[in-house]
Amino acid sequence: MSKRKLTPHLGWLFVVVVLVPGIVLSAIAMRSIGVEEIYIEKSIEKILFAEVSYVASRINSRLAEIEDDLSSSIDPPPLDRLKESFAQWEKTTPLVGVPFLVSPSSEILWPNYSQNLNDEEKTFLDWNRKFLSNEARIPVFENVAVAYKDDILQSTREQYLNLEPGKSLERVKGVADDYRGSSLSQESFASGSYSSADSSGSQNQVLAAQSAIQEFQSSLPIRKKVYEKAKEQGQNVLYRSVKVGQSLPSKQSESKDQESIFISELLNFSEITSRKDKGIIPRSIDGKLSFLFWKRISGGYVLGCVLSQEHFKDLILEMLPSVYSPSRILTLLDENGKPLIMPSEHSVVDWRKPIVASEISEVLPRWEVATYLSDPNMISSRARARELIMWILIVMLYASILSGGVVILRHMRSEIDLAQKKTSFVANVSHELKTPLTSIRMFTEMLKEKKDLAAEKKDQYLALMMSETERLTRLINNVLDFSRSSGAKKQYDFKVCDLVGFCRKCLEDERLRFESKGFKVVFNKSTDSLDLLFDQESLKQVLLNILENAEKYSPRIKEIELEVLKDNSSAVIQIKDRGVGINARDAKHIFKEFYRVDDSLTSSVRGTGLGLTIAKKIISDHGGDIQYQPREGGGSIFKIIIPIRRD
């Protein structure tokens, strides 16, 4: 039977079901490879930002502690004992540099040029006299989101009310919920005003400020609007001393200065001290920040001091965790973008370009907690490693898809071929059954009509009828054996017999039929007898199946030879013919069920394709084997090998 090529619809099915989804998945994977470095950047930024924000909050807490500690470290001093009181304050509190006292009328009571001053006190007066006396204004810093929180909340409410139907309201609803949860009424949220009569007003203000900062940072339009309003009010918008993320591969093209969250406004000393009870004022002197602590005391006086720079920085730096780790460097940058502490082996880092940085407080304007990668190539190295893994996975995906598709298609093709072979098998069996039946009927009619036939002719006809009957029986047995092959194991009747005599008789029984068709039949042996254990009926079925194939496929040179040999501990039966032979490509398939060689010499020959399959199975059950080899000069040799056993 001819092998069928894969039908076109199966090929299209393979493309639609297997290849197209595979290509889509691969395209998605390859697209993800293109943004892998950005994804790693974002992941690292997120982790580092959490650490930086935590450190910034710790520094803010330390600033509040410093204010409280300084405030509680001295009581209001007697005016007639200022020198002794301040000397004691300096001695007991390392943070205190030069103390000062300002009267309600903005007169500097200490230090004073009329007193015997040291150099440090003189320098203090030179730099701060006009400011403390309200003769000069200095920049005072404030968080722009806190300063304009009412405007931010109003803008958020307008967005909430003007959103198109179907848009996600989760973000602005979350902001609104923050205010509802903080005891703010719907009216106060709508107007942006906060009642001072509310017992929880201070807490509400803090919550409002936090939500305003969150909205300010997450919304670019709100941020631009707030900065523009601050400039209209005459306030100065600061710029950060660093360019965050500039060292990252995906952001290196960004060179614009980044606006600070802090704005500045010029105020004199009285305006600053009238807003709260105590605080720390940062002052820029010769490009460096100096810090003044102050607190209001009874009688309208203002007591304070210059903070010791070294001790103040040490207290702040205590809030930093380990500066160096194998993955990152974390440090504190001053107002000029220079690190206050750094590992010596990384002194070549571009400190103005951190991966992540966070501004700290209006008390420390332009100071930032910043992180850098310990290995500048870490992101690209991770990206390349992940890209390699992704490519490997893509290749594996394609290999799996293609190999799975090939397996599926082969299985489908084999199933189709099997179905086609079974269909052809039914037609061939019908033909094969009709052939011996036709012969038997013909000879029967001849015997019936010609009653005066010679005895020799009658014997010949009867022998041919017997041969055709056995052929018919053999064909039916082949079909039955095949139908049982997938079920229970075939039962054999093993007996010790003479193989030489058995093979001779099988050939002689078929000689008349073969010779009537012009075949030369030859029997050879290497020994007179050879006893071994085998099932006679089954082995006869094997021999006749092979002999019948030799008969079918010998259209020109009609010659059949059966030879029995002994080879060491095995008996060998060789059946030789001068037929069309079998090419090497088909030789390895001839023992498969339904397989038939498809060429111009065999296409016209009918057959079931089961004879050799059943023969192979029977000899295998005898512990032997059947082998095919081409015959020199043309034709085929089938070699049946059975181990010699007598029990």
Image: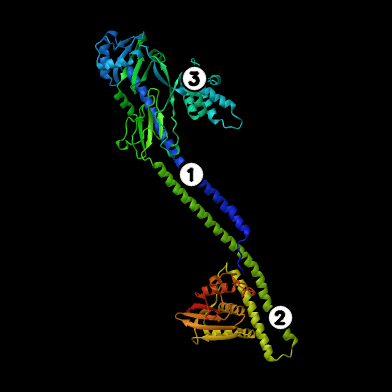
Write down the residue under mark 1.
34
* Position of residue 404 in the picture relative to residue 466 (left or right): left
Q: What amino acid is labelled 3 in the image?
A: Glu
* Position of residue 416 in the picture relative to residue 32 (left or right): right
Residue 412: x percent and y percent? 59, 60
Front disc: 2 or 3: 3
What label sits on residue 441 in the rendered view? 2
**Does residue 75 appear in this view?**
no
Q: Residue at x 65, y 72 (%)?
A: 429
Q: Residue at x 30, y 15 (%)?
A: 126
What label sits on residue 232 in the rendered view? 3
Along the line of sight, which residue is nearer the eye, 168 or 363? 363
Check whether the beta carbons of the residues at disc 3 and disc 1 lie within 8 A of each other.
Answer: no
Compared with 441, 27 (above or below) is above
Label 2, residues with CA under 10 Å away: few <14, some 14-19, many ≥20: few
* Alpha carbon separation for disc pair 3 and 1: 44 Å
Mark 3 or mark 1: name the one nearer the start of the chain: 1
Along the line of sight, which residue is nearer the eye, 488 or 273? 273
Front disc: 2 or 1: 1
Residue 17: x percent and y percent? 59, 53
Residue 249: x percent and y percent? 43, 39
Give the secondary structure at mark 2: helix
